[in-house]
């Protein structure tokens, strides 16, 4: 019995979903892998993964790397990313803001996002200090480990936060378990303050600062951050918070966020 148009459309959609799963898996894993290893890791049939890998290779979305049939993200993705960056003003505005923050404060400046149920650094400008603090762009980190995490989930209700964050992610790098209720209290306080700062949970010698970038509906879609040596961060706390919040407010207003409405929301 011949396939209906609906059957063919559904099959193509599943194939596209799986192709994106392959690309995303390699982005997160950050190393070349064989198609059979990819199939095993993403829980997909080997035959369909091999077929999709060959298709992605033909279109330049994947390239062979490392020998032994291993593949990784292809050069064509770079050109797609470059075209995206040229047209997406938000990324350019963030890059300008990071450059200004790094120059003004002489600290490492970052733009951070949620990637699914994890936090990630999307852009970074390193400090002008001889001793530099940096992070791996694109690395996925549990939300409760980060200053930005308190702001990036602030638009969710309490249950939404608990549904988003895996229970194991409340275990801090030192093995201590953060009480989810305490985390939610910090989220609400950060939302009222319009920023969050704390001693890093990942690097014990640094102090982290984060402020929210809001879109038109008031939701926090990204943060700008400063990562400073602990003593310098505490000494310059007021100046760093002021620099961050000013930069975020400028970008938020360009995205259509109403500053009066945001101030009213923080007071409520």
Image (tube, rainbow, N blue to C red):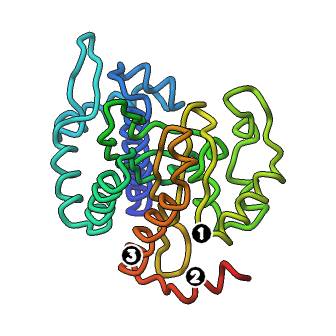
**Which residue is drawn at the image coordinates 80% and 35% (left, top)?**
177
- Secondary structure of the residue carrying tag 3 is helix
Q: CA distance from mark 1 to mark 2?
A: 9 Å
Q: Nearer the viewer, mark 1 or mark 2?
A: 1
Among the 4 quarters of the image, the one containing residue 253: bottom left
**Which residue is drawn at the image coordinates 74% and 67% (left, top)?**
157
In the rendered image, the quadrant that contains the C terminus is bottom right
The image position of residue 216, as x and y in percent, is 47, 81
In this rendering, would 89 be left or right of 117? left
Residue that mark 2 sits on: 262
Number of the label disc, if any, that sits on residue 18: none
Number of the label disc, if any, that sits on residue 194: 1
In this rendering, would 72 be left or right of 176? left
Among the 4 quarters of the image, the one containing residue 168: top right
The image position of residue 150, as x and y in percent, is 64, 56
**Tag 1 near tag 2, CB within 8 Å:** yes
Does label 3 or label 1 sit earlier along the sequence? 1
- Assess disc 1: are there few (<14), some (14-19) or many (≥20) residues with their C-alpha within 10 Å of its C-alpha: many
Q: Is residue 79 above or below residue 32?
A: below
Number of the label disc, if any, that sits on residue 250: 3
- Secondary structure of the residue carrying tag 2 is helix
Q: Which residue is at the front of the view, 85 or 233? A: 233
In this rendering, would 54 be left or right of 159? left
Q: Is residue 197 above or below residue 158?
A: above
Q: CA distance from mark 3 to mark 2?
A: 13 Å
**Tag 3 near tag 2, CB within 8 Å:** no
- Assess disc 3: are there few (<14), some (14-19) or many (≥20) residues with their C-alpha within 10 Å of its C-alpha: some
The image position of residue 142, as x and y in percent, is 61, 40
């Amino acid at each position: 019995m011949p396939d209906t148009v609906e059957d063919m459309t559904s099959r193509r959609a599943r194939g596209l979903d799986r192709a994106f799963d392959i690309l995303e898996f390699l982005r997160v894993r950050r190393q070349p892998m064989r198609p059979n290893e990819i199939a095993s890791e993403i829980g997909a049939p080997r035959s369909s993964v091999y077929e999709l890998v060959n298709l992605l290779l033909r279109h330049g979305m994947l390239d062979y790397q490392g020998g032994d049939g291993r593949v990784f993200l292809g050069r064509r993705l770079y050109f797609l990313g470059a075209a995206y960056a040229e047209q997406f003003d938000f990324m350019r505005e963030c890059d300008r803001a990071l450059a200004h923050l790094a120059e003004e404060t002489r600290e490492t400046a970052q733009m951070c996002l949620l990637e699914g149920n994890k936090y990630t650094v999307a852009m970074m400008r390193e400090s002008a200090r001889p001793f530099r603090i940096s992070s791996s762009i694109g690395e996925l980190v549990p939300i409760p480990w980060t200053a930005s995490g308190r702001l990036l989930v602030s638009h969710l209700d309490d249950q939404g936060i608990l549904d988003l964050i895996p229970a194991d992610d409340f275990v801090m790098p030192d093995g201590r378990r953060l009480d989810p209720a305490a985390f939610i209290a910090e989220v609400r306080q950060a939302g009222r303050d319009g920023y969050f700062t704390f001693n890093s949970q990942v690097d014990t010698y640094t102090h982290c600062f984060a402020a929210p970038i809001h879109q038109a509906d008031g939701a926090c879609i990204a943060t700008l951050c400063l990562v400073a040596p602990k003593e310098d961060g505490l000494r310059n706390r007021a100046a760093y918070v002021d620099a961050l919040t000013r930069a975020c407010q400028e970008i938020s207003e360009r995205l259509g966020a109403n500053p009066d409405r945001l101030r009213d929301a923080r007071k409520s």
